[in-house]
Image (cartoon, rainbow, N blue to C red):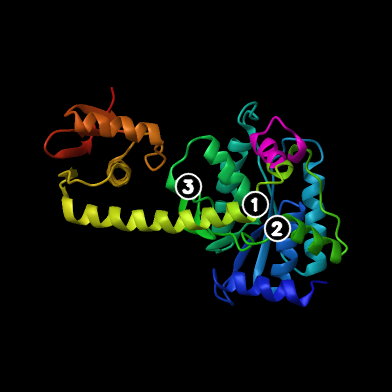
Amino acid sequence: MVPDAPLDRFRTDLDALIAPGEPLGIAVSGGPDSLALLLLAAVARPGEIEAATVDHGLRPGSRAEAEQVGDICVRLGVPHTILGIEWDVPPSSAIQEQAREVRYDTLDEWMQARSLASVATAHHLDDQAETMVMRLKRGSGVRGLSGMRPLASVPGHPDLNLLRPLLGWRRSELEEICAAAGIDPISDPSNADEKYERVRIRRAVEEADWLDPKALARSAANLADADDAVEWAAALEWTRYTRFNEGEITYRPSRAPVEILRRLVARAVKELGTEGVPEDLRGRELDRLIADLQAGRTTTLRGVRCQGGRDWRFTPAPARR
């Protein structure tokens, strides 16, 4: 069903992320990418995987498509669960962003119920290239441009592992795996709808013959290494110059570059934050906060009182009335 060469390649990629014998969840939408992941994993790790399909319920036929994935899983001998989402009010804007957030929350519940610590998704090299172009368009820094990592945490759920074993694979290669297995992937009309930014970026990358997705992915990997180096330096700065005492974090600014300062103040807010999503600070928010601290001003962000001066002090802000 799966040729030996791609199967051996996949085993190598997957073994680098999770040891054989460890139970693994597979997120399968029914498109060619996730079906190829399912096919490869079913042969590479027989008896060690379970699959789940999230039915967002946002378009007609989504339940039937999820059931088609279930039929394929029966043929492969892979346990499969359909995770239906019931919206109080279906999203009318930022649909893909809201669906993504709910999808990961739903997968988290499934993983915990099935005692799975890791889930694999089918993000691939072309996805990585598109992500980098999208973030370039937004003016992202090193962390944003480093793209998706092969091993990360499930968004919003730091105790669960998110594996991306296909980041080195092209979309066309995954389509060939489905074709060789005689499986017709499900076609999601949203993947051709140019009202979504990713679809517009995808077509732009495909039409730009001077732009090499492989080179973009290599750049993302190089920037990921650079991001790790900056993170290492920020951790060193934190150890040397911060103090944590009775709920207060104090930092005495050195001559650290601004990117190090961004990560330090972001960590302080994450440690003490009580409002919103403290770990999800935007670059502009951090830059404004640093400017206030350097000017000796006091400001509140995510429930944290941030006071500038010779020492920068971070304390929980008084509860709002």
Secondary structure beneath label 3: loop
Which one is in front in this view, the residue at disc 1 or the one at disc 2?
1
Left or right of 108, for residue 196:
right
Single out the residue that lies furthest toward the front: 210
Q: Do the numbered discs 1 and 2 sit on residues whose CB atoms are within 8 Å?
A: yes
Left or right of 281, for residue 98:
right
> Residue 262 appears at what percent x and percent y?
31, 42
Q: Amino acid at mark 2?
A: Arg
Are there few (<14), some (14-19), or many (20+) residues within 10 Å of tag 2? some
**Quadrant placement of the C terminus:** top left
> Residue 74 appears at what percent x and percent y?
80, 64
> Residue 200 appears at what percent x and percent y?
69, 35
Give the magenta range: 191-204
Are there few (<14), some (14-19), or many (20+) residues within 10 Å of tag 1? many
Q: Amino acid at mark 3?
A: Gly
Secondary structure beneath label 1: helix
Left or right of 110, for residue 264:
left
Q: Examine the residues drawn in magenta and state their main secondary structure.
A: helix
Residue for badge 3:
156
Residue sitting at x 65%, y 30%? 90
Q: Do the numbered discs 3 and 1 sit on residues whose CB atoms are within 8 Å?
A: no
Question: Camera-side residue: 309 or 25?
Answer: 309
Secondary structure beneath label 2: loop
Distance in Å between CA atoms under marks 3 and 1: 29 Å
Residue sitting at x 68%, y 43%? 205
Residue for badge 2:
170
Q: Do the numbered discs 2 and 3 sit on residues whose CB atoms are within 8 Å?
A: no
In the figure, 72 relative to 21: above or below? above
Residue for badge 1:
213
Left or right of 55, for residue 241:
left
Name which of mark 1 and mark 2 comes first in the sequence: 2
